[in-house]
Amino acid sequence: MTILDELRHCRFGVLVLLCGFAYGCSTPKYTTVREHPEFQESRAQFKSLAVFPPDVAFQHLVFDGDHQSVPEREEAIAHELAALLPGLLAARGYEVKEFAFEEQAESDSDFAFEMSQLRDAYGRVSIELYDRALVKESESRSFDKSVGTVVNQFCARAQADGLIVTRYYGFDKSKGMRAKEIAAAIAFAALTGSYPMYPARGSAVEVAMLDCVSGDVLWTNAKSNQADNTDVLDWALADLPKI
């Protein structure tokens, strides 16, 4: 299942709709972080991380609903995320092991298929992790989910303890779409006295650390904002425990 498939079912986009734009995420008793029950005790074992190529979707939203993917934006954002991740992880104390996953996939169709299998496996787990955008902090360390052993070969090649998986969705809107929303907002305000805000652009990112042996999702966080750039990545990783 791709990110866009999940958006059509209101899954990956839940952070955009609920957390970043509508209600805010500032309540201290709630969090977007999910942790495996054993992560706090075992996290010192995960000193080295490999960065899996980010999974990126970007759409231009239009008036008639026939929204368009923007491949050039997707490629640029994927490259920017991949470039940012090593430095952000190093700042948290982790050693980043480099491996050219995409180059290997270009020359090895079986490897490329396994990469898609891992993305699908995490996509299925993500649905369970984020069936609610926010959870109580007291519940956040009770998420026992795994992608299974599909993760093993990627970690073995990179010789890493853990694997970082990143998913990103971004959008902007056409002038026609913006005009439609402004008209709807004016009509709503006339009826209720309240003027709703419709963001012209936005993004959401989900970052997960996977155990290279078991495939357990050790830690994950998801954030969103009203900008179609990669700034949200720094925000998401700010909650990753340092070692």
Image (spheres, helix red, strand yellow):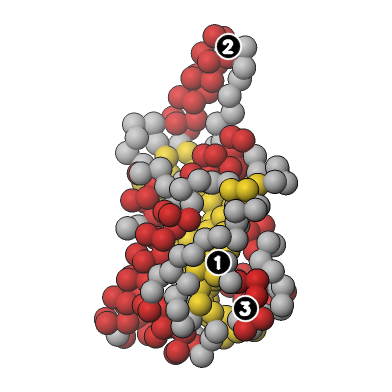
**Of callouts 3 and 2, the N-terminal one:** 3
> Mark 3 is on which residue type?
Ser
Label 1 sits on a secondary structure element that is loop
Q: Are marks 1 and 3 in contact (CB under 8 Å)?
A: no
**Of callouts 1 and 3, the N-terminal one:** 1
Which residue matches tag 1? 36
> Mark 2 is on which residue type?
Thr
**Of callouts 1 and 2, the N-terminal one:** 1
Give the residue drawn at x 40%, y 70%.
147
Image quarter hosting the N terminus: bottom left
Give the residue drawn at x 41%, y 83%.
152
Image quarter hosting the C terminus: bottom right
Residue 185, position in %: x, y?
54, 20
Q: Nearer the viewer, residue 162 or 110?
A: 162
Which residue matches tag 2? 192
Question: How much space separates mark 1 and mark 3, taking CA atoms?
Answer: 10 Å
Label 3 sits on a secondary structure element that is helix
Which residue matches tag 3? 42
Direction from residue 188 to residue 44 in the image, left or right: right
**Residue 153 sits above or below residue 79 on the image:** below
Residue 156, position in %: x, y?
45, 89
> Mark 1 is on which residue type?
His
**Residue 152 sits above or below residue 130 on the image:** below
Residue 164, position in %: x, y?
53, 72
